[in-house]
Image: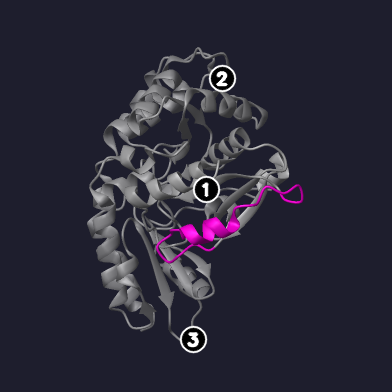
Amino acid sequence: MRTQAPLPPRIDLRSDTFTQPTPAMRQAMATAPVGDDVVGEDPTVCALEALAAETMGKEAAVYVTSGTQGNLSSLLAHCGRGDEVIMGHLGHTFLYEQGGSAALGGIHPRTVPNQDDGTIRLEDLAAAVRADNEHFPISRLVVLENTHNRRYGSYLTPAYTDAVAAFAHDHGMKLHIDGARIFNAAVAQGGDVKALVRNADSVTFCLSKGLSAPVGSVVCGSADFIRRARRARKVLGGGMRQAGIIAAAGIVALQQMVGRLAEDHVNARRLAEGVAAVPGFAVDLSHVQTNIVYIDVVHPDFSAADVAARLREQEVGVFDTSPHRLRAVTHYGIAAADIEEAIQVFSQLFT
């Protein structure tokens, strides 16, 4: 049972899910025209879906409550019971979505290694594809994650994604992209997000991470795919009514918050460089590409949990993701001055 919520740390680097909606979002939410989205009559939701589809270069889109619901709706739309989906062993869909595709969809996950940069080697995909044999499930779908959370926030390139899409299609499969932070990937590479998904059959992206909206994700794909994904959303309990109140913030997110992600990347790089210079910590700077920084605790007397607790006492929030590793994520609301203060706190922990 939840009691009164604790106060968050003043410099909250635990995740970009801790962003707060902007004043423009709050104003848009207060004045949004609404209707019943389940019957397609919420004008603000319709506007968000049209904007998202255009932004991704896809035919259609559907607004969902979360990235997890978006990924699961996509897998249910692409696969039938007993089909197999190939995904990275460190992918969010495999690790952090409660096995929903298997539990609710009867979809069999087959994992292959994620490389250090978040990619999956084509030869590993090829080895995972099932032969046409009645003893095996049918290989139906490949899932990529861009940017890749557990692989340091690394981004996938358009060329790589195109190669995986071509491989999947050549083998009679579809490609889904978990693009929770795909706008970070686009901004980091200085390109159009459309290039990152142009040959993918579906993509999910989050409005509630770096784009700062309070809730929601969007799934984009062909009109026929979105029809199936919308049905899947319904059975998962995602049919919302006057959802335009929250969708309004998503429109502002897409119109106003994409370009500023570059600021988060600059702040992440500065944090990484500052903490790497502190004895007791190690950061591989070559892995810092976007807004995620993984910090190894190499002090012999402290675990990552110890460090996270000490940082929290000094109003700096990070997550301990393993016994000797911390994760820090920059986002809207974290300024350059906050980064400098956080580095100073790190530098004083072991003194």
Q: Secondary structure at mark 3?
A: loop
**Quarter of the image that includes the C terminus:** bottom left
Q: CA distance from mark 3 to mark 1?
A: 40 Å
Q: Earlier in the sequence, mark 2 or mark 3?
A: 2
Which residue is more in the foreground, 140 or 241? Answer: 140
Q: Which mark is on residue 143?
A: 1
x, y percent for residue 15: 43, 54
Q: Position of residue 244 (x, y in %)?
A: 46, 21
Q: Residue at x 39, y 22 (%)?
A: 50
**Mark 3: amino acid:** Asp
Amino acid marked by disc 2: Arg
Is residue 348 rendered magenta in the image? no
Q: Which residues are magenta?
A: 113-136
Is residue 269 rendered to the left or right of residue 206? Answer: left
Magenta segment, prevailing SS (helix, strand or loop): loop
In front here: 225 or 26? Answer: 225
Say which mark, if any, is on residue 241.
Answer: 2
Give the residue type that dot 1 points to: Val
Look at the numbered discs 2 and 3 and tell me whether their residues touch, using CB distance below 8 Å: no
> Is residue 133 a member of the stretch shown in magenta?
yes
Return the residue at label 3: 301
Residue at 33% x, 33% y is 254
Does 334 sit above or below residue 79?
A: below
Distance between the alpha carbons at the discs numbered 2 and 1 = 30 Å
Q: Which type of secondary structure does the marked residue at label 1 adopt?
A: strand
